Image: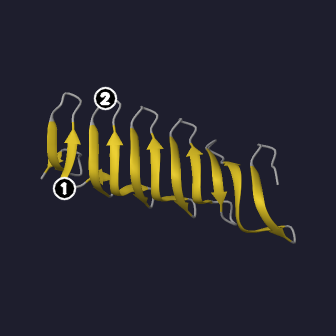
Amino acid sequence: MTWPDKSFFEGDWRNGSRIGMGHGRIQAPDNSVYEGSLNQDLKPHFKGTKTWFSGEQYTGDWDKGVRQGTGQMKYVNGDCYTGEWSDKVRQGEGKMLYKDGRVEEGQWINDRLYKGEIIDYADGGRYEGGTNEEKKRHG
């Protein structure tokens, strides 16, 4: 099925209704576009890419419309995070590459780098530890 905004769904149908998983391209009211696996409710599910109107883009695992699992987020400012996600936040092992050359790698909890991890700076400096809620070195 194809809609006027060029969104489409390819999958199984029965009696005029979608059944099970499928593949498609969906344009949301906020002008974000998702392309990949979709569940019966047309929510991102399993693998796919979502591009927001701002230019940010996430490619990876989804669960019922939520970033969940492993994926990569490219931010509009040039930063990029690759790693694990849980309920739309960085959670688990991951690596953040900043446009200015900084690297934060290790265990992430609730969208921030957690204690005992490594931060490499563009000038060659290195910090082993975590960050607090204000993203200041801690530990």
Label 2 with label 1: CB-CB less than 8 Å: no
Q: Assess disc 1: are there few (<14), some (14-19) or many (≥20) residues with their C-alpha within 10 Å of its C-alpha.
A: some
In front: 95, or 112? 95
Residue 120 location in percent, x, y? 21, 38
Q: Assess disc 2: are there few (<14), some (14-19) or many (≥20) residues with their C-alpha within 10 Å of its C-alpha.
A: few
Which residue is pictured at 27% across the width and 35% down the height? 102
Q: Is residue 116 above or below residue 136?
A: below
Relative placement, left or right, of 136 versus 2 is left
Residue 100 appears in view: yes
Kindly give the residue lying farthest to the right in the view shown: 15
The amino acid marked with disc number 1 is Lys
Residue 117 location in percent, x, y? 21, 51
As measured in the structure, the alpha-carbon distance from the residue carrying label 2 to the one carrying label 1 is: 23 Å
Residue 108 location in percent, x, y? 30, 55
Residue 111 appears in view: no
Q: For residue 115, which numbered disc appears in the image?
A: 1
Mark 1 lies on a secondary structure that is: loop
Residue marked by disc 2: 100
Relative placement, left or right, of 31 versus 54 is right
Which residue is pictured at 19% across the width and 44% down the height? 136
